[in-house]
Amino acid sequence: MLHVFFAFLLALTGLINPESVYVIPTLPVESIYVSEIGMFNHRDGRVDLIQDVEHPRSVSIATDLIDPKGIGYSQGKVWVADVNRVVAVDPASGREKIFPSRKFKPRPTFLNDICALEDTVYVSDTQKNVVYEIHRGKIKVLLKLKAPNGIAYDRGDNSLYIASYTRPGRVYRYKNGRIKLIYSSRDIDGTDGLAMWNQKRILFISGYLSGKVVALDLKNGKVLGRLSGLHNPADIAFDERDSTLFIPEMSAGRVSAYRVKLEK
């Protein structure tokens, strides 16, 4: 049987409530986008591009956000879930396109994670129990689910995986209008982030309340490995180019990086 092993690499410290990490393959390896909530309910949230995490250089692309959480990238823009609105930022110019709360029905109150594809963006509202779809500027409810949080797209079978911020934690697969529970465990209590290792068909799942990350084999539903002792792991990201998992640990104010190995 295969097993996933996590080897600690480094930690980026001094962050204020880092919530989400996103990797863009067109950027150099170990360059990441990070959303920082800052002080809750203050307009001090930001999204930074951190280049070369071993010798970090940080550039802010947005600094006027409220409590930014999930981030994604498509159409040349970084998409940000910011409480009750979605902000699309041009990283080069800093120009923003805002999708305000009045454009959503029902109006959002706790937008959480974002999954951005070529022409479609999905965003979860954990309090409203819905996942919205933004397609070519038009917004609709894609599905209803209890406390949806993390969202990941599976290129292997063109489905969405959606985390439910519950106890026990739950992960669902959504495809062709149907939703199915695929995994539930106390190991992922407060299920938050999802990240795909597409080449190996492995889904990484973070439990914000459990302080763990689980590696789930999507081919057979078996757990291949667990990482414990984390401080509120939130919206994780995986870089397949060098098998690095980035984990924002909100309460510790850091983003930790682990090299992931798959061995028998």
Image: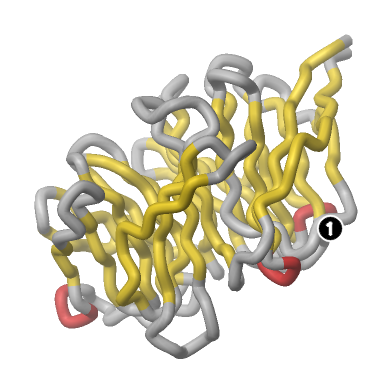
Which quarter of the figure has residue 107? bottom left
Which quarter of the figure has residue 84? bottom left
Whether residue 111 is visible here, answered yes or no, is: yes
Residue 153 % position (x, y): 44, 36
Seen in the picture, residue 211 relative to 175 is either above or below; the reply is below
Most extreme residue toward the top, as rendered? 264
Q: Is residue 92 left or right of residue 195?
A: left
Quadrant in the picture for the N terminus: top right
Of helix, strand and loop, which one carries label 1?
A: helix
Residue holding disc 1: 186
Instruction: Kindly identify the residue that appears in the image at 59 percent across and 26 percent down.
Output: 197
> What coloring was used for the rendering?
secondary structure
Whether residue 180 is visible here, answered yes or no, is: no
In this view, the residue in front, 160 or 228, is 228
Residue 44 % position (x, y): 42, 81
Instruction: Kindly identify the residue that appears in the image at 74 percent across and 26 percent down.
Output: 260
Q: Is residue 30 left or right of residue 102?
A: right
Residue 109 % position (x, y): 39, 82
Most extreme residue toward the bottom, as rendered? 41
Residue 186 % position (x, y): 84, 58
Q: Is residue 229 left or right of residue 59?
A: right
Seen in the picture, residue 235 relative to 227 is either above or below; the reply is below
Quadrant in the picture for the C terminus: top right
Which amino acid does the dot numbered 1 rest on? Arg
Q: How many marks?
A: 1
Seen in the picture, residue 139 relative to 2 is either above or below; the reply is below
Q: Residues within 10 Å of mark 1 (few under 14, many from 20)?
A: some
Instruction: Kindly identify the residue that appears in the image at 82 percent across and 28 percent down.
Output: 224
In this view, the residue in front, 103 or 175, is 103
